[in-house]
């Protein structure tokens, strides 16, 4: 009876965690680039009441083990990286990723990665995310083979005239002059604009990063992910190359949360919670009967 009671308690904790994850998914149903979470469970431990035997092969057969489970526990909290639907906005600096990859932003704590593509320009013309972090970019469509470091991307890229020849490769941040007109972003991440003389200029190429194991990334808040020991090192490059997704200007990737699925999971968690409370109350009633045996 006490085993059943403690098993019920473990079940209550599990389904409370499931409700927490479902609630967070629903809260972010309209968050650009959000990837939903999922909880899985596993049994906790089993107490062996009787061991298995193989029999003697002539008069008796084998006997299966006798084990009583002692509850469950949370196995994983996964991030599901299915592609979210694209929402058309018509704004040139709203750029969604169609396929694999993450935008790379530079912060004081290191590189951060995001799928949210609502970009802006600051007072100096730098291309930034909604919270003001710089996007990692390359001067040309053939970025250096060496991975960038924080120190190597502190300066802005210098726009160049593509008819005059491309300068040396470099990593940096994209800067769009205040006099720029007709800013556009191509599917390979090339940011172009028309300058005040009417000439076409290329401000740079938005870099994206791939990981061997997306599920190993850590959520750091503000639509950002960070590298972990199980995600693998980021592979930087141009969108559309080496398995990276292409960019879609004028559209944003929506959250991949499916409300019908989340509400169903909410019902499952609620009923599971109720069932485990019944285990506790039933065990309590039996304990009460035992107490009342001697009056």
Image (cartoon, rainbow, N blue to C red):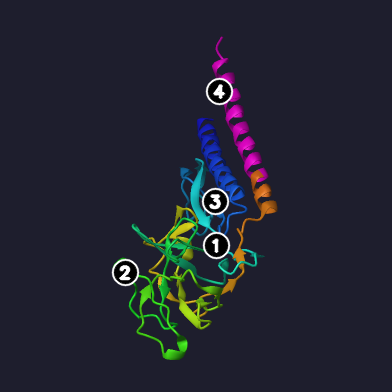
Q: Residues within 10 Å of mark 2 (few under 14, many from 20)?
A: few
SS for dot 3: strand
Label whose residue precedes the other's in the sequence (1 or 3): 3
Instruction: Between label 4 and label 3, give the one nearer the viewer.
Output: 3
Among all residues in the image, which is located at the extreme left? 151
Instruction: Between label 1 and label 4, give the one nearer the viewer.
Output: 1
Label whose residue precedes the other's in the sequence (4 or 3): 3
Along the viewing direction, whichever of 53 and 227 lies nearer the viewer: 227
Residue that mark 4 sits on: 287
SS for dot 2: loop
Residue that mark 1 sits on: 118
* Residue at the spot 61% in from the left edge and 38% down from the top edge: 273
* Residue at the spot 42% in from the left edge and 60% down from the top edge: 133
Magenta-colored stretch includes residue 278: yes
Measured as percent of width and height from the top left, residue 224 is found at: 46, 58
Instruction: Between label 2 and label 1, give the one nearer the viewer.
Output: 1
Residue that mark 3 sits on: 39
Q: What stretch is highlighted in magenta?
A: 267-295
Residue that mark 2 sits on: 149
Task: For marks 1 and 4, give the CA distance.
Answer: 60 Å
């Amino acid at each position: 009876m006490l085993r059943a009671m403690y098993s019920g308690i473990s079940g209550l904790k599990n389904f409370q965690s499931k409700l927490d994850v479902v609630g967070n998914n629903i809260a972010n149903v309209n968050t650009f680039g959000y990837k939903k979470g999922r909880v899985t469970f596993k049994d906790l431990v089993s107490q062996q009441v009787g061991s298995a035997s193989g029999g003697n092969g002539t008069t008796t057969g084998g006997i299966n083990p006798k084990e009583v489970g002692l509850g469950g526990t949370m196995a994983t909290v996964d991030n599901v990286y299915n592609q979210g639907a694209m929402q058309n906005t018509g704004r040139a600096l709203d750029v969604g990723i169609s396929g694999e990859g993450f935008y790379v932003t530079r912060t004081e704590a290191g590189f951060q990665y995001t799928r949210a593509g609502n970009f802006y320009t600051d007072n100096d013309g730098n291309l930034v995310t909604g919270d003001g972090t710089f996007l990692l970019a390359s001067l040309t469509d053939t970025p250096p083979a060496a991975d960038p470091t924080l120190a190597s991307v502190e300066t802005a890229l210098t726009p160049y005239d593509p008819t005059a020849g491309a300068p040396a490769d470099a990593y940096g941040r994209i800067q769009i002059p205040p006099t720029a007109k007709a800013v556009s972003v191509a599917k390979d991440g090339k940011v172009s604009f028309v300058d005040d003389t009417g000439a076409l200029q290329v401000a740079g190429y938005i870099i994206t990063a791939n990981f061997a194991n997306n599920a190993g990334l850590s959520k750091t808040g503000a639509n950002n992910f960070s590298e972990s020991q199980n995600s693998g090192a980021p592979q930087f490059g141009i969108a559309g190359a080496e398995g990276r997704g292409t960019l879609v200007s004028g559209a944003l990737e929506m959250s991949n949360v499916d409300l019908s699925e989340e509400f169903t999971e909410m019902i499952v968690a609620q009923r599971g919670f109720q069932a485990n409370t019944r285990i506790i109350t039933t065990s309590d009633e039996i304990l009460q009967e035992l107490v009342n045996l001697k009056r």
